[in-house]
Amino acid sequence: MKEIAEELKTGKVIVCPTDTVYGILADAANEKAAKKIFDIKKRQKRKPIPVFVKDIRMAKRIAFIDKKQEKFLKKVWSGKITVILKRKINSGLPKILFGQKKTIGLRIPDYKLVNILLKKINRPLTGTSANISGKLPSTKIKEVLKQFENQKIQPDLVINAGNLPKSSPSTVINLTGKKPKILRKGDYEIEKN
C-alpha cells in the first residue's frame, strides 16, 4: 500500500479495483496525471471526471455542501453513489477534471484498498472507470487489460485483484437543484434514503 501511495504521489496513473468496477486512480490535484487519464481513456475533454474523497471534510474543501446535503451524504457514503455538487473555484484541483462545468462528482467508495490509499496520500483521487470511452466498464481484469493492451498511452500500474463481484458503475445523483435528480442508475437503491 505504501508503494502504491508513493506511485500516486509522483503522478502515476493506476488501474485499481473498486467497490463497483475497475477504476483509474490518480492524484486528482496533479494536472499532468489528470490529462494522462483523458489520453488513456480517449475521453473528450468536455466530459468531467469524478473524484474519490476520504471523508465529508475533504469533500467540503472541494464542494459546497449545505446541512441537508451533508445529512444525505452521511446516509449514503461510503458506497456506490456519486453525488454532483457545486464545486469550489479554489479547490486546488485542475480545471480539466470539470469539463467546463461548475459542478463536481464526488464519492467515498466502500472499498478498503481505495480508502486506505485515500488516507495514506490524504488527497482526493480520480475515480473514473478503467475503460476506453465508449466501451463498457468491467469487473473482469482480462477485459480491462485487453482494452488497454495496444494503446499508445497506458496506465503506469495495474493492481490485479482478479475478477470483482458483478456490479454496475455507481449511481449518480445531482444535488445541485431544488430536488435531487438521478443521472445514472447503478446498483444503489436511492429510494431507501
Image (cartoon, rainbow, N blue to C red):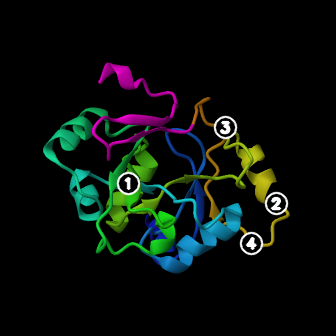
Marks 2 and 1 in Cβ contact (< 8 Å): no
Residue 2, relative to residue 137: is it above or below?
A: below
Please report the bounds of the magenta region as a residue range. 169-193
Mark 4 is on which residue type? Ile
Q: CA distance from mark 3 to mark 2?
A: 18 Å
Residue carrying label 4: 153
The secondary element bearing badge 4 is classed as loop
- Which residue is at 34% across, 35% downward? 180
Q: CA distance from mark 1 to mark 3?
A: 21 Å
Residue at the image position 33 percent from the left and 52 percent from the top: 85
For disc 1, the neighbor class at 10 Å (few under 14, some 14 to 19, many from 20) is some
Give the SS element for disc 2. Answer: loop
Q: Quadrant of the N terminus?
A: bottom left
Residue beneath the point at 76% across and 53% down:
145
Return the disc, 2 or 1, that comes first in the chain's sequence. Answer: 1
In the picture of the structure, the residue carrying the numbered disc 3 is 163
> Alpha carbon of mark 1 to alpha carbon of mark 4: how far?
27 Å
Count the labels in the image.
Answer: 4
Disc 3 residue type?
Asn
- Quick one: 75 or 164, which is closer to the camera? 75
Mark 1 / mark 3, whichever is N-terminal: 1
Q: Are marks 1 and 3 in contact (CB under 8 Å)?
A: no
Q: In the displayed structure, does residue 104 sit left or right of residue 39?
A: left
In the displayed structure image, the side of residue 66 where residue 21 appears, left or right: right
Q: Secondary structure at mark 1?
A: helix
* Residue occupied by mark 1: 116
